[in-house]
Image (cartoon, rainbow, N blue to C red):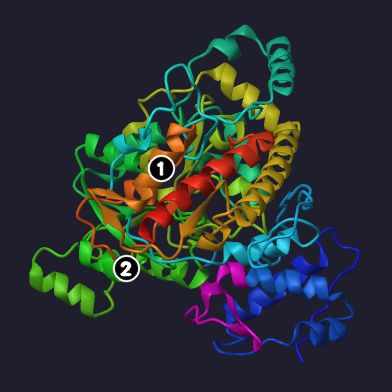
Amino acid sequence: MLTYALNRTARESLYEQLYRALRFDIESGALGAGDRLPSKRAFAKHLGVSVVTVEGAYDQLVAEGYVRAVPRSGFYVQEIGPNLASFSRISTSAEVKVPLGDSSGAKSASCRPEARISGNDGVEKLEKLARKGAPFCIAHSEEGLAGVSPGAGRKWLADFTGATAPEGVFPYAAWARTLRRVLADESERTVLEASRPQGSPRLRAAIAAHLRGFRGMEVHPDQIVIGSGAQSLYGLLVQLLGRDLVYGVEDPGYPRLTRIYESNDVTVRPIALDGEGPALESLARAGVDVLHCTPSHQFPTGITVPVSRRRSLLEWAQSGVAAPKDGAAAGEARGRSVKASSARPRYLIEDDFDCEFRMAGRPVPPLAALDGAGRVVYANTFSKTLGGAFRIGYMVLPEALAERFRDRLGFYACTVGALEQLTLARFMESGDYERHVNRQRTRYRRLLSALIDALTASSAGDHLHFANAGAGLHFLMEVRGVEGDERGGATFEERVARRAAIRGVRLAPLGRYRFTGCEAGWRRPSFMMSFSSVKEETIPEVVGIVSEAVMAEVGCRS
């Protein structure tokens, strides 16, 4: 049986040590595809640890795609390709600090066991839900997100589209205290001076330390570029990579992202998703040079891309072949593995937009931490942790691109003021930022637990299925048994959304995130449920409205 030396006095927990040891053996090939891991009880007894420790390690390996769980059979190593560790930049021995906050969920009434996520087993249930995904192909219309007004003079009782900022997300007291200290300690010249092209060195150093501790990324501050939100940085990125390249975006995906790229005069093509993220066949067929993706928590489906697909995406980026120019070339690209070429470089833009709020298990390592060839641009923003009005984002460039940025775009001034940057830097250095994120994560975990419990126990509960919950601040609510229903030009999703909107609940049908003309490969009615702005005390009323809207339309089919 497998034997590992676990250090009971180390800062890293036993389950994290075991997870790292198993992951290293899988990446290095010591454990091959199809190998069965020891049973949890037998392994725990052999190592002298609790079953919970082994469960935690196994569940994290499943969440990252290293292992698959087979009911009533056990855990088996997945095929991830030869020697993943050989091109990984993430250390398997380094300690990664992952603050998870309070893992306990709110107590609630009993409900169907496969959907319940609260109580003492809340994290385990969240992890099981987070592993449930499905292929989606869902019509691209940002205007449609506005939906129906709740009525004259009324505000939304609940908004699941993500357009409403959650209350209490900005830490006013701690931020004001930090701002006063900056004004007292820093010179007027420092506070008022023009920002350097890449941003404040102090803030870039703080971000690098945060990424090292929270995401396992080893980056130099000189690789970081700060801007007023991630969206403004994408314009710079187009200038840096080139307008002659073809840019791919996920389908379904974020409508505004497509418009940002199109406004920068580049060709944009949709890349269809399957159950594991961007589909490789679609990627080859589209002939793109740059893929913008959200592998940790795809928007809007919530899919977490497993490590095997991450490896394939990295191989695609590292191959660097020219985009197919005619039908024959496209056919060849679809039918065989591409060969390396220096004709046109390929890049992955990794949008890690709400990685701080993974509710179950450790955060999955980002693509940037696995990239050893300098093909991944990592982007993130503080808007999810500090509020949408807080417009500071950043990107981490591979070293070669960072040097090119300084040479070609170094004439730009940073779009964020020095005072804001210095305040955020000190806010992070003091630990206030980490404490704030921990509090928010605990709040969101409790909110998610209460919401899914209530939906499951509602009159529509037997028709609802929840996918990819616990991976971030949105999940999928699928309605089963009504596939392919469309009457009078309005889909089932839209009719449910209209019923709910009239009573003050704003839903986000997944059909609104699909590119027009996308082949419909999955037609189960679903809703993207962005829950961070929902007030816990309104959940009973909100769920009542949603369930009644669903059942009214289900009844119309009877």
Vertical relation: 119 (above or below) 25: above
Q: Which residue is drawn at 42% across and 66% down?
A: 481
Residue at the spot of label 2: 319
Is tag 2's residue or tag 1's residue first in the polypeptide sequence? 2
Report the side of 413 relative to 98 (left or right).
Answer: left
Quarter of the picture containing the C terminus is bottom left
Q: What residue type is labelled 2?
A: Ser
Quarter of the image holding residue 501?
top left
Residue at the spot of label 1: 497
Quarter of the image holding residue 459?
bottom right
* Boundaries of the magenta span: 62-87
Q: Which residue is drawn at 87% across and 84% down?
A: 45
Report the side of 71 relative to 263 (left or right).
Answer: right
Residue 225 shows in the view: no
Percent from the top left, x then y, of residue 352? Answer: 51, 48
Q: Nearer the viewer, residue 511 or 131?
A: 511
Quarter of the picture containing the N terminus is bottom right
76 falls in the magenta region: yes
Asked which secondary structure carries label 1, the reply is helix
Q: What residue type is labelled 1?
A: Ala
Asked which secondary structure carries label 2, the reply is helix
Vertical relation: 175 (above or below) 163: above
1 falls in the magenta region: no
Crowd around label 2: few <14 · some 14–19 · many ≥20 (10 Å): some
Vertical relation: 345 (above or below) 156: below
Percent from the top left, x then y, of residue 373? Answer: 43, 62
Q: Which residue is drawn at 68% across and 33% down?
A: 428
Percent from the top left, x then y, of residue 311? Answer: 45, 70
Q: Nearer the viewer, residue 132 or 486?
A: 486
Quarter of the image holding residue 466?
bottom right
Residue 40 shows in the view: yes
Between marks 2 and 1 in the image, the one whose residue lies nearer the viewer: 1
